[in-house]
Amino acid sequence: MIKTPYLLFLGDAPDMLATKVAIGIKDWRPDASVGQFRMEGCKADLGLPDMTIDQAIEAGAETLVIGVANRGGLISDSWKAVLVEALEKGMDIASGLHNLLKDEAELAAAAMMHGRTLFDVRVPMVEFPIANGVKRTGKRCLPVGTDCSVGKMYTGLAMEKVMHARDMNATFRPTGQTGILITGGGIPLDAVVADFMAGAVEYLTPDNDADHWDLIEGQGSLFHVSYSGVTMALIHGGQPDALVLCHEPTRAHMRGLPDYQQPSLAELRDVALTLAKVANPACKVVGISVNTQHMSEVEADAYLKEVEAEMGLPTVDPFRHGAERLVDALAAC
Amino acid sequence: MIKTPYLLFLGDAPDMLATKVAIGIKDWRPDASVGQFRMEGCKADLGLPDMTIDQAIEAGAETLVIGVANRGGLISDSWKAVLVEALEKGMDIASGLHNLLKDEAELAAAAMMHGRTLFDVRVPMVEFPIANGVKRTGKRCLPVGTDCSVGKMYTGLAMEKVMHARDMNATFRPTGQTGILITGGGIPLDAVVADFMAGAVEYLTPDNDADHWDLIEGQGSLFHVSYSGVTMALIHGGQPDALVLCHEPTRAHMRGLPDYQQPSLAELRDVALTLAKVANPACKVVGISVNTQHMSEVEADAYLKEVEAEMGLPTVDPFRHGAERLVDALAAC
């Protein structure tokens, strides 16, 4: 587990978009983010206190999280003096970048010298078993999308927030880099070897109390040809009791695939439910989560009402309006 | 290149199915298999001469092929004395297991000492791209199964044999260790990292002549919870024009999953075709391949007729009776 609280390192981010990981952490774990570290030329600002390494240590920061991705996912040479200082002064470092902290000689040496840990959350830490498909105790909810990057992680986190506010027994289970950095644990599923994907999901969501819900972070889409295998492994390894359909209605085409169109929500429902019932015949689709960030309030309301009438399922934007109705549906499940 | 002929090592295989790799090599390269090596407790028998290492060397064996897979793909400690003896006495070793020969200190040391080569055919040799889903030229056929180990590889190899006899332009494309050991090339798809699975299949089946057919080796099943993600990546990365449904009608339950039943052929057809049409809207199911090895000739004939009438598709056991009718259906496609 990665120790909190975090100092969020924004480096020399050219814009807000480059700090998506830090924004995710700040949005979902504001309590775990003591401040931000910005270098000269940084164009991003999370609205957190700017801190030096010394100030962050003083404020209790245990881990510096690299919350910025530059072109190519590299660890910039210009960052290294700061990262080495953080290690020297007592912080661990966590990163979800493609290039690994542990492969950077200066960082590896400083970490060893000062007894600190480098967390490369893109690398699976465990040898996973082959999935055995045995029915597990407790309950599981999985968001599935019409496309990639439609809000599956935010849906799960928003549901967890409501469930905790209601004293329900629930755990968000990250399967991607940002989710792992937000919660401090999880499995980077897209980096797991093919044969062990479903086994990794079983490992991530073990037996639990009868009233406990795992909110599994979704990945990819059954309709996205680049990543559909990862989605399939989540559906069968996760053996969900409940699916939430996730959609972003303003896309011109599937993300990164100009020749492909998003399926309808009805198509997604039919194929996802058919496949989910293989692992859990009792699985149900309980609601719909729409990412309306590119719609006005009026447009969003009209769209949500229309989808709800058409699909006969509670339909909300959980980030914009809260996940209460999705949690109601889960509680009734 | 892996040198032939082979000694097929069956180890302490608990049943015939565990020696699928050896059976495949014996069936499709009988000329290349001088004998079998069985340890105490081995429950499998290929009907080849049983040989000691000395006898195999005497018979000309150049390579010991590990033709048995235990669950998890491990190299048993109990096998090692035999493997070291083979290296000492002059054989190379080839393996498709997940655990690598080269990672076993005793084997690596013995190979180095005696100037022998360890072939781990499960290790991908290439860094694959993320799939881009762009439509490729040429045609592709993919067998999909109601379960694992129902005859998908045999179906593809039997179709290739008929197509070559008819001077058709066709290539079997292995995606598993047995296929790679049989043909000398291919991609060990189940060892590819999740994000790159579909990209690996695109790489394996590139643009080709308009009249060329790739016969892609299937893996797993959309209905087998341990491996369905790999199957999904084959369907989307392969963008098949033609699917062949594969079935073994005598199984009591899904392979390795006592709590799971095989789907009907109609269920498989519907879900596989729906998903295949995402990548190739023109995809069709062209025929059905039934593995009747556990049925009498009379039972098999009756079953094939019954399925053909029910499904309205040419239905054959291509290993028992030849793949002519499946190839006819492909040619008409």
Image (spheres, coloured by chain):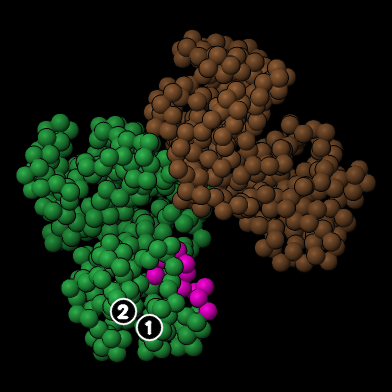
Chain colours: A green, B brown
A69 in the magenta segment:
no
Q: Can you give x and y, in whole percent of width and height, for residue B132 in the image? A: 45, 43
Q: Identify the residue at image location x=46%, y=24%.
A: B283
Q: Identify the residue at image location x=13%, y=53%.
A: A320
* Furthest residue in direction right, as rendered: B58
Residue of label 2: A39
Residue of label 1: A82
- Given the image, on which type of amino acid does mark 2 rest? Met
Q: Quadrant of the N terminus of chain A?
A: bottom left
Judge left or right: residue B76 versus residue B61: left
Span colored in magenta: A95-105
- Given the image, on which type of amino acid does mark 1 rest? Val
Image mark 1: chain? A
Is residue A5 visible in this depiction of the protein? Answer: no
N-terminal of the two: label 2 or label 1? Answer: 2
Marks 2 and 1 share the same chain: yes
Judge left or right: residue A78 versus residue A19: right
Q: Are marks 2 and 1 in contact (CB under 8 Å)?
A: yes
SS under mark 2: loop
